[in-house]
Amino acid sequence: MKLYHGSKNSSLQLIKKQQAQAGEGVEVPADELLEGIYLTPDYGYALAMAARPDGLTHINTENKTIAFENPEAFDTQMPVYIYEVDVPDDQARQIDQLQWVIENMKEIVPTQVFNHQAGDVTQYYEVLKEKRETENKVPEFKIK
């Protein structure tokens, strides 16, 4: 199956296993904070993961909106990359509608890379100036 991984890194020869982290004060079930290779079947979601600036990111999948803790740090011209991988069906486990994880491999080789600018995320999500609370959202993610 084809899945995607978004990154700011332009030279990933391998996508490596890492430990997921939740944002501060955000409760995420322990089974979603796995050490693994995180992928998504949704190209727009992978782009959102690559485009986000440091701080918390709030994504509402129902309303197709995205808000950043530090919106002033969102650089629409920043180069970002979407890595496509071909994963055997028995290697990935679905966490939720947008997230899959590979736990039993240390790394995977991308089959293709797509170049973007962070601002391309607006083709998939409306970027909000401030967070709007809604019921249907993906857990918040924090990057440093």
Image (cartoon, rainbow, N blue to C red):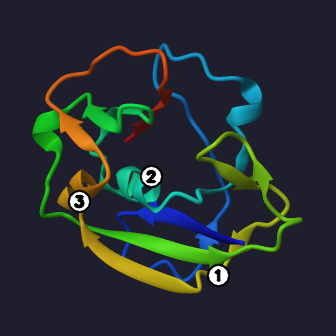
Q: Are marks 3 and 2 in contact (CB under 8 Å)?
A: no
Alpha carbon of mark 1 to alpha carbon of mark 2: how far? 20 Å
Q: Earlier in the sequence, mark 1 or mark 2?
A: 2
Which residue is located at x 15 percent, y 42 percent? 73
SS of the residue under disc 2: helix
Q: Is residue 88 toward the left or the right of residue 61 in the image?
A: right
Considering the numbered disc 3 on the image, is that residue within a helix, a strand or a loop? Answer: helix
**Could you tell which of marks 3 and 1 lies nearer the N-terminus?**
1
User: Residue 54 location, x and y as percent?
Assistant: 30, 41
Name the foreground residue: 8 vs 126. 126
Frontmost residue, 12 versus 137: 137
Q: Which residue is mark 3?
A: 118
- Label 1 element class: loop
Residue at 12% across, 63% down: 77
90 sits left or right of 114 in the view: right
Look at the image and tell me in which quarter the N terminus lies.
bottom right
Q: Quadrant of the C terminus?
A: top left
Q: Amino acid at mark 1?
A: Val
- Of badges 3 and 2, nearer the viewer stands 2
Q: Nearer the viewer, residue 23 or 117?
A: 117
119 lies above or below 109: above
Amino acid at circle 3: Ala
95 on left or right of 71: right
How far is disc 3 from disc 2 in space, using C-alphas?
Answer: 12 Å
The kind of residue tagged 2 is Tyr
Q: Which mark is residue 2?
A: none
Earlier residue among tags 3 and 2: 2
Return the residue at label 1: 109
Circle 1/circle 2 CB separation < 8 Å: no
Tell me the tag on residue 45. 2
